[in-house]
């Protein structure tokens, strides 16, 4: 193992070589946005740590480019290495965003599974509790304090942006604070790692990394519905953990009974503990969320207009936070005080349904199609590609659930929408032509007079 300065320098050099290879494998836009400001921090215990400038970048790279980045590093290093994306902290380089026990060396109470996984913004303390989420919150707190003792598994479902992931990270923080091991993974990340393990004939090694944890936190299980092999691996992992009395917490955008075509055996497992849902927040809850977010962001000059925001933004918690960030940025950049009049002006846009119509029209125009053809049953190659891109943009730009997207596209079922989304999501980082097409469509949308500012985070 290299010593301090040499190890840091070595990591930087290795990452520069990796970036040279990655630059020709991903689109220019993705490279500039997500990899351009990254830096190799360290390489020890077979884990290569890469620092990035934001939580969004860390999450995006973990979800979208993890397999490609890991393969590139393995090729350069000539040995098997894992890769972790962390948010740079100038006080402790490379370790921001880690759970409180991420740096422990006390006989293994912290492990690689717990490192760099839990978002510091998502704790029980800053979760706004209301009638819409009270049961889910109480159950999550109970399993975090007594993992494996009750509500196992705990299954939390809701439409997108209502706080499911927040609760998973909160469980992770409290579990690790109590000296136990926890790991958080999205279904997509689990699937990507499983596929890589199959290719490298290391499935047993992949499964073994979950065996000694006390809390298994699994986000968006619906992503696995049509992935038979990955579902089987998940099922085996689930059974092994459950039989060893390990806590399992799973989230999805619908209840197990509504997941088609999930096997009755797996449905039975998922329903074997406690199944709870989170409903969209009412006005009072939305107002309390905005006040809590404003306090966290140390924004004081918006207090008098938060009730207007709560009235106008009725979707989900994520949209509320986006609206607040947007208003704060407008106030800062324009140097003006936000008043009820300016809030009404800034947040008065086309309703979400109209935004979707604009999106569908932009996609259809790009492919010289009529919008109706995206909604109809037409399945030729060009129309299918256009429809899949529309699905991808609705999911990524508006955080629409798969069910909501299906309704917008003529009542298509969950599995069909998931298939379309996955096709684009898996190809966009490695297909420059596809990435360029998506960027062109987004640019057209950005030029629309009524286009909502919040979409620019896609």
Image (cartoon, grey):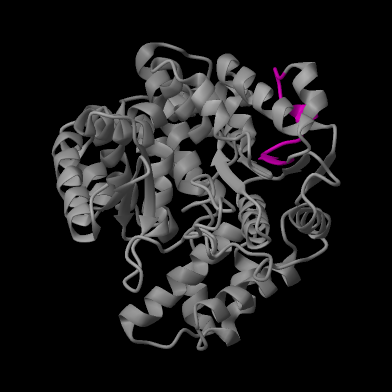
Location of residue 163 in the rendering, given as x and y in whole percent from the top left corner: 65, 55
Question: Which residue is at a point 47% across and 60% down the rendered structure image?
Answer: 103
Q: Total number of numbered labels?
A: 0
Specify the segment rendered in magenta: 247-262
Q: Residue at x 62, y 48 (%)?
A: 182
Q: Which residue occupies the extreme top position in the image?
A: 380
Q: Can residue 435 be seen in the rendering of this structure?
A: yes
Give left or right: position of 116 versus 83: right
Residue 292 image offset from top left, x and y in percent: 62, 76
**Residue 83 image position (x, y, % from top left):** 36, 41
The image shows residue 299, relative to residue 186, as above or below, that is below
In the picture shown, does residue 24 fall above or below 39? above
Q: Is residue 141 left or right of residue 334?
A: right
Looking at the image, residue 252 sits to the left or right of residue 428; the answer is right
In the rendered view, does 290 fall on the left or right side of 349? right
Q: Residue at x 18, y 51 (%)?
A: 12
Does the stretch in magenta take in 430? Answer: no
| Residue nearer the viewer, 56 or 72 | 72
- Residue 457 in sight in this render: no
Q: What percent of the width, then of the height, locates residue 19?
A: 18, 42
Please tell me which residue is depicted at 82% across the width and 24% down the height of the picture: 268
Task: Please tell me which residue lies in front, 320 or 127.
Answer: 127
Q: Nearer the viewer, residue 115 or 404?
A: 115
């Amino acid at each position: 193992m290299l010593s301090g300065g040499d190890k840091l320098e070595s990591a930087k050099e290795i990452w520069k070589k990796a970036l040279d290879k990655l630059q020709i494998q991903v689109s220019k836009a993705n490279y500039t946005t997500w990899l351009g400001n990254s830096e190799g921090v360290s390489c020890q215990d077979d884990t290569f740590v890469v620092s990035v400038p934001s939580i969004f970048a860390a999450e995006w790279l973990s979800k979208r480019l993890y397999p490609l980045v890991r393969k590139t590093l393995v090729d350069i290093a000539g040995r098997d290495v894992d890769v972790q994306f962390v948010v740079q902290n100038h006080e402790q380089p490379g370790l921001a965003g880690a759970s409180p026990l991420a740096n422990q060396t006390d006989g293994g109470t912290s492990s690689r599974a717990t490192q760099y996984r839990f978002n510091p913004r998502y704790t029980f303390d800053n979760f706004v509790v209301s009638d819409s989420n009270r049961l889910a919150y109480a159950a999550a707190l109970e399993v975090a304090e007594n993992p494996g003792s009750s509500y196992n598994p705990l299954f939390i479902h809701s439409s997108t942006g209502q706080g499911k992931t927040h609760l998973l990270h909160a469980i992770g923080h409290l579990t690790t604070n109590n000296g136990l091991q926890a790991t958080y993974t999205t279904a997509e990340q689990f699937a990507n790692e499983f596929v890589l393990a199959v290719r490298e004939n290391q499935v047993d090694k992949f499964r073994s990394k979950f065996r000694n944890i006390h809390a298994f936190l699994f986000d968006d299980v619906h992503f696995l519905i049509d992935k038979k092999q990955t579902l089987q691996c998940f099922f085996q992992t689930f059974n092994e953990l459950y039989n060893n009395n390990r806590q399992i917490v799973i989230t999805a955008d619908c209840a197990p009974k509504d997941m088609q075509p999930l096997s009755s055996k797996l449905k039975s497992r998922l329903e074997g503990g406690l199944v709870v849902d989170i409903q969209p927040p009412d006005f009072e809850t939305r107002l309390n969320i905005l006040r809590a977010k404003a306090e966290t962001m140390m924004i004081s000059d918006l207090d008098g207009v938060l009730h207007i925001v709560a009235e106008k933004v009725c979707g989900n918690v994520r949209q509320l936070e986006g609206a607040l960030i947007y208003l704060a940025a407008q106030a800062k950049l324009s140097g003006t005080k936000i008043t009820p009049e300016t809030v009404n002006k800034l947040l008065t846009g086309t309703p979400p349904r109209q935004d979707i119509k604009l999106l569908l029209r932009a996609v259809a125009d790009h492919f010289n199609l009529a919008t109706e053809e995206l909604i109809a049953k037409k399945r030729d190659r060009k129309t299918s590609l256009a429809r899949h891109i529309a699905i991808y943009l609705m999911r990524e730009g508006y955080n629409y659930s798969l069910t909501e997207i299906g309704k917008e596209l003529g009542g298509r079922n969950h599995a069909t929408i998931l298939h379309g989304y996955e096709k684009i999501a898996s190809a966009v980082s490695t297909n420059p032509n596809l990435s360029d097409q998506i960027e062109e469509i987004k640019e057209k949308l950005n030029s629309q007079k009524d286009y909502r500012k919040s979409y620019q985070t896609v």
